[in-house]
Amino acid sequence: NLFFSNSSSNGSGGRCSLCPQSPEVSFCPLSPEISPCPQSPEVPYIVSTRYRTAYHFQPPRNWINDPCGLMYYKGIYHNFYQYNPHCALWCWGDITWGHSVSTDLVNWIQLEPVIEPDNPSDIDGCWTGSATILSGGQPVILYTGGSRDKCQVQNLVHPKNPSDPYLREWTKTGNNPVIQPVVPGLNRSQFRDPTTGWIGPDGLWRIAVGAELKSYTAALLYKSEDFLSWTRVDHPLYSQNLSNIVECNMWECLDFFAVLPGNNTGLDMSAAILRGTKHALKMSVGYFDKYLIGVYDLKRDAFVPDTIVDDCRLWLKIDYGNFYASKSFFDSKKGRRIIWGWSKEADCRSDDVAKGWAGIHTIPRTIWLDSNGKQLLQWPVDEIESLRTNEINHQGLELNKGDMFEINGVDTFQADVEIYFELTSINAAEPFNSSSLLDPEKHCCEAGASVHGGIGPFGLVILASNNMDEHTVVHFRVYKSQQKYMILMCSDLRRSSIRPSRYTPAYGGFFELDLAKERKISLRTLIDRSAVESFGGGGRVCITSRVYPAVLADVGRAHMYAFNNGSATVRVPQLSAWTMRKAQVNVEKGWSAI
């Protein structure tokens, strides 16, 4: 029988608000006074190596945040990223561009940092930017630098030896910064994160830069003939008046890319725009990565969203959990667009310093536009399946109210689980209240897995201790509005750890599904020790979570269940699970292999 409690853990979680406060170690910069990084008191349990991921991207030690200049070049995938080579905290003046390479997006070799703060235009840090492959095939990188007067500027670097597929050395352009914050009304300390370039209607290169101005936030548009000398276009790519927006602020970590409805083939932004093409404008805002779908109007040289929604809370999200500062790129090898983001730790700064590392990148995902042209879909890249082993399968399960089916035979700390839930009836769906869209996290708290429903909650219990004092739940509920069905997907971390001072919220997001035509709802969950990534409804809602169960460090064994706690019976026509092998990710001195 189901054994859940409504109470939250004794950690810092359980709060049910739209944008809950993140723990101390956030993307927000620490004050200059505490750099260099302070030493931490001893925190024995968190130092356990069991909390380090086995197949997610992270450096051997120290701080990591945004993925930056992602690219595929001469047979090699490149991940450049925000990195502090000195300690496990974000510190003024320490942030460099770390660099790792891969041939399969799974196993990575860490190389030396490529961009370091050593010029007046980046002396306070080499911050987020993007890579662009120019028409002649040579890559370049634009990145934001922080100067001593807290002014943010855009700098350019190019490879010292373009024939080197590993791009181990880069040279800063002599006339950096190439773009300065000389815009009327611009906040000079809120001007950052240039996008990958694309060819505009006049044949010139375009980029967008996130900015906060006196009364609005914008993706400022710049053009160039040679990627060296830039001129601001007299209108932004897109902007919104801050006075009319609810809970929205500066857009950072912008991304702008083309997509075709119902086609998972990626599009190169430097190529001609195909008929029927739409564009996605992604921004990191608040605590989430959000996006708008629309068209790139070539005559106006501007992005025009299909739907204008002033309330930022209603914008769709790339990921509804612990996921930020994502970056995408066109993979010319396989003709797809790939995206991944940063997932920060959910502990505190003293913990991070004690264990010596902080931050991971999510599994690379293929991203494309749904056939309805309204929503982006995401799915882990196929390459990650190379780590699968010890497959187990179950067919024809039936879950009645209160049933739990234990999934045995795989490593519950390192697993890939795919489940299809089939609804036997849709008549028991509860009525949908559209106000829930404003705060799905709150709804996940109030309608947790222990709260009986009509159709649902049903889903997956993972990382569960013997007595269920600790467990994480990923589950669905089905609601009926006047003309459609809405599915709420939750990742509830409120009892994920008995340890104090953990950040344990309940994440959630809604997606539409035509249950009159299709009664199956899919769930795929990747479990990697302290990281959990879940993909619901074929990638319509994605939720990344960070968890630190004591059972992982102390016991070394946990339980996993498929469950149903709704009145309506749910069938499971197919359940597959695999143990995931450890990947070779940035192992010490891996650079010596090349």
Image (spheres, rainbow, N blue to C red):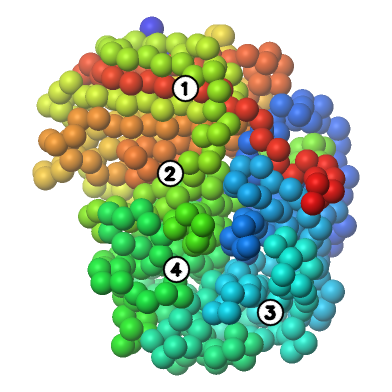
Q: Residue under label 1, please give it.
A: 577
Tag count: 4
Q: Residue under label 4, please give it.
A: 268
Which three-letter amino acid code belongs to the residue tagged 4? Asp
Circle 2 packing at 10 Å, graded few (<14), some (14-19), many (20+), is: many
- Which of the 4 quarters of the picture holds residue 73? bottom right
Circle 1 packing at 10 Å, graded few (<14), some (14-19), many (20+), is: many
- The numbered mark at residue 379 is 2
Q: Earlier in the sequence, mark 3 or mark 2?
A: 3
310, above or below 473, in the image? below
**Residue at coordinates 36% horizontally, 53% vertically from top-left?**
264
Q: Secondary structure at mark 4?
A: loop
As measured in the structure, the alpha-carbon distance from the residue carrying label 3 to the one carrying label 2 is 32 Å
**Residue at coordinates 38% horizontally, 7% vertically from top-left?**
1
- Which of the 4 quarters of the picture holds residue 257? bottom left
Q: Secondary structure at mark 1?
A: strand
Which three-letter amino acid code belongs to the residue tagged 1? Ala
Q: Earlier in the sequence, mark 1 or mark 3?
A: 3
